[in-house]
Amino acid sequence: MIATRKHLSRRSLLRGLGTAIALPLLDAMTPAFAAPAQAKSAPLRLAYLYVPNGIIMDDWTPATEGKTFDLPRILAALESFRDNVLVPTGLRQNNGYPLGDGPGDHARAAATFLTGVHPKKTYGADIQAGISADQVAARHIGQSTKFASLELGLEDGRLTGNCDSGYSCAYSNTISWRTPSTPLPPEVNPRAAFERLFGATPETPETRARRERYERSILDFVSESTRQLTGELGPADRRKMDQYLSAVREIERRIEMTEKDNRQIVPDMEKPDGVPAAFQDYARLMFDMMWIAFQTDLTRVSTFMLGREGSLRTYREIGIADAHHPLTHHRGNADWIEKITQINTHHVEQLAYFLGKLRATPDGDGTLLDHTAILYGSGLSDGNKHDHADLPVLVAGGGIGRGHIRYPKETPMNNLHLTLLDRAGVKIEFLGDSEGELEYL
C-alpha cells in the first residue's frame, strides 16, 4: 500500500436527510506521516456522576488506607476496576451547611457539589449559586467538540418553585451551572438525548411520524454516506465502523422497544417517551448515551444525575418499594439502613457497567477508560444527619491512581475539582472555596 498524506478529519460526519452522525476514532483520522505521539494522542474526557440523599458510610468507606484494601460492600461491584479507582475520604463542602439559612440541606447538597458556593436561599427568579466545575471545563475544552457539555438525568424536575424549605427547585434538580444564575437542566428523555446527539436538524412531527410508520432507523438516512465512506476505509476501520453503527442501532432499538412497551402498559401516563420502567435499564441506556458521545468526540464533558435530591424513587426491581428519601431518615432503624445500602450498591453497579463500556472501547493508544476521568459521589454523606463532611466520592479512570487516601477532615471538596481540571489541561487558580490542589492524586 502506498501511504499518502490524506486523512479523514475527526470532525467528519455521516450525513443524510435531517441527520448527521459523528464517527468514532478511526485509523484513517491519523495523518500518514504523523509522529508517533501525535498519532496516538487522544483527548481527555470528564464525567461527573451524582447520586442523591447520601450513602451509608460504614459500607462505603474502606477500612484501611493505601493501595491494597478490601472493597467495602457498596463498592464491591468495582472489584475488576480496582486499579482504576481511587477513594478519597475527608472531603467536605462547607457551603452545604446552613450558615445561618436554616433547613434546606438537600438543595444545598446538589447546588454545592460542583460549585463549592453557598446558594442564595430563594425560590424566586433571583437564584444564585456558582459556576460548576463541569462548565469551567466546558469553557476551556468544549470548544473543540459539537457540544461543549452534555447534561443527563434520570428524574424530571422543574427549575422553578419551592422544593426544599425555601430553596428553589433549581438547586435540587441540577448540579450544572453555566453561570451563578444559570442552571442547566439535565435531559431525562432518552429519545430527546439521542436525537440531540445525532439529528443535524430537529425532526418535524411529519418527518418523525413517517420514519416511525416505516420503522426506519436513523442509520437508514445516512446509508449512502456510510456506503461511500466504508468503501474508502481499510479492514480495521471497517470493523470499527460496523461495531460503532451496531451500537448506535442497539441504543435506538432499546428506545423504540421502551416507547412501545410504555404505550401498551401505561398509555395514559404522562411521562417522557422512551423512559424504561426499571431503573437499571433506564440508567444503562443513558450511560450508553454518554459513552457514545465520548466515543465520537461529540463532547468531552458530561454530568449525569442518577437521581435528584430528595428523590422519592422506589426500587421495586431489587425488592424495595419504599421511597428513597424517607428511608435515608432511618434514625438507626436497621431494616431501613439495609434498604438504603442495597440502593447505594445498586447505583454503584450501574457505574461498573459504564466503566466496563469505556474499558471495552479502543481509543487512541488505549481505551476510553484510559482517557476519561470520572467523579462519582453525593453531596451528603450521612443522609439521616444531612452531613456535608467526609463526602462519599470516588474517582475512576486512567492515570488516576488507585487505593484509599484519607485527607484531613476540613479539606475542601473543590480541591479535588481543581485537581481534576488541572489534569484535563484546564489551568485555573481557584474554584469556589478551593484552597489548592490535592496531593497524591
Image (cartoon, rainbow, N blue to C red):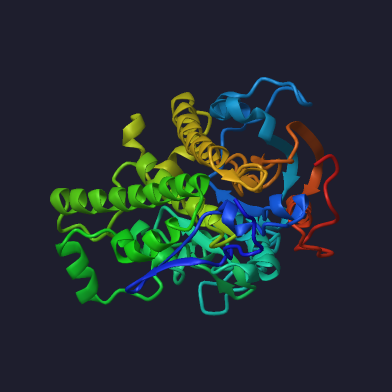
Query: Where does residue 403 sit, x and y in percent of width and height?
Result: 73, 30
- Locate residue 339: give its quadrant: top left
Task: State how many labels appear.
Answer: 0
Left or right of residue 280: residue 396? right
Residue lying furthest front in this view?
Answer: 2
Answer yes or no: is residue 168 visible. Answer: no
Question: In terms of depth relative to the viewer, which is nearer, 95 or 265?
Answer: 265
Query: Where does residue 140 sit, x and y in percent of width and height?
Result: 71, 68
Query: Where does residue 89 sit, x and y in percent of width and height?
Result: 73, 37
Residue appearing at x 27%, y 77% in the figure: 204
Residue appearing at x 68%, y 61% in the figure: 133
- Locate residue 193: give its quadrant: bottom left
Left or right of residue 339: residue 112? right
Answer yes or no: is residue 292 visible. Answer: yes
Residue lying furthest bottom in this view?
Answer: 125
| 171 relative to 155, above or below | below
- Locate residue 303: give its quadrant: bottom right
| 110 relative to 312, above or below | below
- Quarter containing the C terminus: top right
Query: Where does residue 317 sit, x and y in percent of width and height?
Result: 32, 34
Question: In terms of depth relative to the viewer, which is nearer, 384 or 355?
Answer: 355
| 108 relative to 362, above or below | below
